[in-house]
Image (cartoon, rainbow, N blue to C red):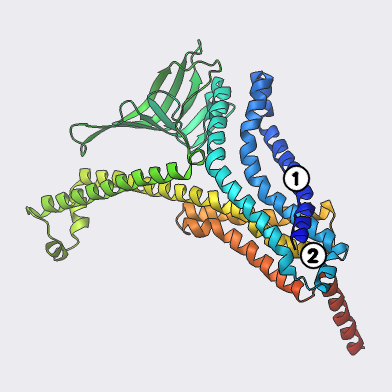
Amino acid sequence: MKILSRYLLRESIGPFFFGLAIITLVLIMDFLVDIMNLIINKGLDIYTVVELFGLNLAWMLALAVPMAVLVAVLMAFGRLSSDNEITACKACGISFNRLLLPVLGGALVLTLLMIWFNDRVLPESNHKARMLLTDITRKKPTWSLEENIFLDRFEGYSIRVRTVSRKTSEISDVVVIQTANAQRVITSRHGKMFFSADNSTLILELEDGEVLDIDPKNPNGYTRTEFAKQTIAIPGESTDMQRTTEAARGDREMTVGMMQEQNRSRMIKLEANRTQADSLISNAIANTYKIKSIKPEAIAGLPKPVDRALSENKEIAARLAFLEKSAEGYEQEINSMEVEIQKKFSIPAACIAFALIGAPLGSLARKGGFATGIGFSLFFFIIYWAFLIGGEQLADIDVLPAFWAMWIPNFIISGAGIGLTLIFIRQSSIVSIFDRLRELLHLTKIRHA
């Protein structure tokens, strides 16, 4: 049995590395198209180009390895089936389930390796790649802006834009938070972002917006000022490429431990937010009904106490609206982190799911060609990825829990694999199924005749 296990693994190793190379090459070509203009325009040296590709190779491997497992298992079992080696094993009393064991064992090893890779290597590579790409695109800040993502690389400022025009440097739905003074938030409907003539200062020309200044001595009080046009100058932003050594990390640049720590911190802030909101509501009711203490039984006897209190206390209502938006932001960030945590485990586990479906599918198809392996692999990987992306979107809007959103694709592929295995064990094949359909059609024609 050990000889058979080694033989099955040896048959899978070659197609695995060949499939891995082809799939990675496809991903590299797609990545190359995205950054080719950037590389040419910036005149990068060969070392920087190689470093950029090397750092981005990590996320390519994270996607390519599960797909390469599917290619390898499909091709290996397809060749065994076409050479009647599976039939010979059955004649010797070796079940198909026994043939699956070494392949599933290899897939399990790859799963564990990729879980470690996704949690330790991938976040660091993503972080360094983002910093390098930011340094490369520094001459044109709009190129380094990601829509709907806060950019924290400007000292003393955190900037988020809804949309960016790469050609005109125009930005819209802008939020600027002065991190040096966390009590000021500037919002604007639209504006422009560009460098000064000497390339030493980043200029933000904002239009149709407002400034929210919160009194540090009184957190419940704030000043709101509207403006038609306002200019913000951020000095020290040279257009020359400078290597960044430290920067804030996004969710795909963190380990599981980092993300869990971030979520614990956000949960504390969320609870404090809710406590402050409850206090504001109690104060509003007390001011409205001229009572000193608020008890639940007393509030229950009042006619629509919260609605009336908020309608008569506009300032408190505005603060509550601000707190509600903050709470929604914390909840979305927590949910997003949970999705990324689950993704670090579910994508590597796809190696096992693809092994489960690859073995019976390759055996049923009775073909071991590379084109067949790649074709089936692309088909099932597109299905898997569609469910994964859809699940992530549903989790982001809180329709599905993070666990189910990220693991349903694995369950679907694994279930399909188990079903195909049962079909094969009952000695069915795609060829025989088609033959039976043709026989039924022939009998139907005879009866009608």
The residues bearing labels 1 and 2 have C-alpha atoms spaced at a distance of 21 Å
Q: Residue at x 23, y 35 (%)?
A: 222
Q: Is residue 106 left or right of residue 427?
A: left
- In primary-sequence order, the first of circles 1 and 2 is 1
Disc 2: CA contacts within 10 A as few (<14), some (14-19) or many (>=20): many
- Say which quadrant the N terminus sits in: bottom right
Outermost residue toward the top in this view: 198
The vertical placement of 244 against 89, above or below, is: above
Outermost residue toward the front in this view: 2
Q: Position of residue 70 (x, y in %)?
A: 72, 55
Q: Residue at x 51, y 60 (%)?
A: 404
Q: Is residue 74 visible?
A: no
Q: Residue at x 54, y 48 (%)?
A: 344
Quadrant position of residue 240: top right
Q: Nearer the viewer, residue 396 or 342?
A: 342
> In terms of secondary structure, where does tag 1 sit?
helix
The vertical placement of 295 against 140, above or below, is: below
The residue carrying mark 1 is: 17
> Which numbered dot is residue 159?
none
Residue kind at label 1, given as amino acid type? Phe
Q: Position of residue 354 (x, y in %)?
A: 68, 58
Counting every numbered tag in the picture gives 2
Q: Position of residue 293 (x, y in %)?
A: 8, 55
Q: Is residue 183 left or right of residue 127?
A: left
Disc 1: CA contacts within 10 A as few (<14), some (14-19) or many (>=20): some
Q: Residue at x 63, y 52 (%)?
A: 109
Q: Nearer the viewer, residue 213 or 136?
A: 136
> Which numbered dot is residue 363?
2
